Amino acid sequence: MTDATQTRPAPDRHVPDRLNSRAARIFKSWEALLLAVAIAIFVINSFASPYFLSAWNLSDATFNFTEKAMIAFAMALLIISGEIDLSVASIIALASTAMGLALQYGAGTPELVIIGLTVGLLCGAFNGFFVTVLGLPSIVVTIGTMSLFRGISFIILGDDAFRGYPASFSWFGQGYIYWVFTVEMLLFVIIAVIYGILLHKTNFGRAVYAIGNNPTGALFSGIRVARVKFILFLLTGLMSGIAAVCLTSRLGSTRPSIATGMELEVVTMVVLGGVNILGGSGTIPGVVIAAFVMGLVTFGLGLLNVPGIVMSIFIGLLLIGVIALPRLWAMAAERRKP
Amino acid sequence: MSVLKKLAASAAMAAAMIATPAFAQDDVRIAIVVKALGIGFFEAAAEGAEEAAEELGNVEIIYTGPTDTTAEGQIEVINALIAQQVDAIAISANDTDALVPALQRAMQRGITVISWDSGVAPEGRQLHLNPSSNPLIGNMIIKLAADHLPDGGEVALLSATTTSTNQNIWIEEMMAVMGDYPGIDVVATVYGDDLADKSYREATGLMQSYPDLDAIIAPTSVGIVAAAQAVVDADKVGQVNVTGLGLPSEMAGAIESGASQSFAIWNPIDLGYSATMLAYELSQNGAEAAPGAEIPMGRMGTLTLDENNEGAMADPFVYDASNIDDFKSIF
């Protein structure tokens, strides 16, 4: 059998991430463009502030994006499949509140982590149930659960806070693996690799693209669409749980307002990373670069003491610019055609 | 990804080579970190900080804060300030506890950290500057009424809810100093629940029940506005003076109509000024933040720290016809 396959060249089973090959070229250049933007920002920052090129400062800066990026990877898959989860920040709030509550009953670090991840998974399952079993639109469901999950936190905590997490728990959000490399950075890298493999190297990943491009077609070609989507919601919930552990550990306390507004930053990161908001295309390396771009921009502007509102404007312009550029390219290419 | 890794590695190497960036900083850099930018109260505090900087001469003020009032946003700001090696951070915190790890890191790297207005837990700062204190507020609200009643008279209290902690403490403190104001009688205490309509009805009721009432003291920003409106509507301007704690922007009309002679609240300019002075004293003049310490803060006198390293700046600032126009646009 091995001889037979070796003598005959294997048939080309490569299915491009987008069916249109011209679009695929633009898509590839998108990441190149993003990388160029990231490098440009890095260089500009180095010149703009004497404090930028310091290992410790750059290490601190990674906290600006590591937690968001963890969720962004799962969100990328969800958006590629044509769904979205806007409740991720509220899942963080609920998972963090659950951990704080468990702490009051004497839970140790391992229990806290398990509870955080479990609550994340349960919230993901809750979203997934309404979207895949009842067939409701995910944007509606998750806008609802966005209020619901955080609402529960507010009911439990009110204007109070859980504090007094054990010292060993602070390792996740404040610990260092080696020199300036934080625990969160390691998690970020591991999760990025896992999602990269999951999306680009497995049948599951192929199914995600197929569903995003044509759910009906995917269904008729034997993909269990509902199951794949349910798993994606579970993964997003789990990632929110991991982010909740990191963020709670970093803050050393829980308030119901924790991570407010983070869902939009996560979605921004995903879209900036080249994932089509309508589903069907996108890559994990793109999201990784987008995470760095957003982290470097906010930190660089922070070093120059640029007010937060100007930063938001900058991020907005960056997002529109990076999205519009390939589109303009495509239009220009169209015009050049005879 | 690999390119980024290389970049990160080269950045780390560059950092190691430069070690300490040769960057002469003559000025003392004090960061005023606020809950969120674009709030009049904090803009005024920044003005006060600039005033202190001018007085001190060699101080550069970095006025900054996040866009939303989130702890995460403030932590990003704090990280950027740590990276810049500022001399001091004076912060009005969005979260008592969540900022502690970030601020502790700042202190470990030699940065002076104080909180003002909205405090940080004791382990996350060297001292906290309160705009005022409960005894000072309790005394101020009765003094405001008594100042316009040289021959004594009847006053009534319009509070928030029966369970409002702050208001109850202030009223208690007020009752404790009543001996200093002979001839002033507190005839009633009513509760408007911090609702405009209920406060209005309670104030109207007070004027009907006590026809000789001379003043209504409302130590709540909702109650004071409602009471002033009730006095205007009852045509009792000049007979009943409304006073207490309120916001200049909301009370400007009452001052203009004469329903209120004067009222009090903290002065954000003084607050920013004092925070800057304290940060400078701690970071440059070797002042020690310890219980019982007395730290000078320029024209605002000295701050005395209690067992939690907290101190009260001053009496609440009195607003009347002479200065309301300057403040009504601020907060």
Image (cartoon, grey):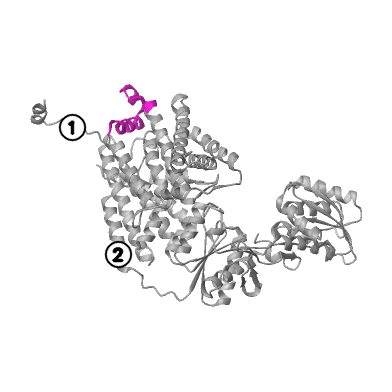
Point out residue A295 in the picture as x, y percentages from the top left corner. 39, 53
Residue B189: image tag:
none
Q: Amino acid at mark 1?
A: Asp
**Callout 2: residue from which chain?**
B
**Camera-side residue: B269 or A165?**
A165
Point out residue B239 in the picture as x, y percentages from the top left corner. 88, 59
**Callout 1: residue from which chain?**
A
Residue B14: image tag:
2
When asked about the image quadrant of residue B126, the answer is bottom right
Magenta region, mostly helix, strand or loop?
Answer: helix
**Camera-side residue: B153 or A167?**
A167
Total numbered labels: 2
When asked about the image quadrant of residue A82, the answer is top left
Magenta-tinted stretch: A202-227
Q: Residue at x 33, y 38 (%)?
A: A281
Magenta includes B295? no
Q: Are marks 1 and 2 in contact (CB under 8 Å)?
A: no
Quickly name the residue at label 1.
A12
Q: Is A186 located above or below residue A228 in the figure?
A: below
**Camera-side residue: B103 or B13?**
B103
Regarding residue A82, the answer to whether it shows in the image is no
When asked about the image quadrant of residue B271, the answer is bottom right
Q: Is B199 located above or below residue B138 in the figure?
A: above
Q: Residue at x 47, y 42 (%)?
A: A108
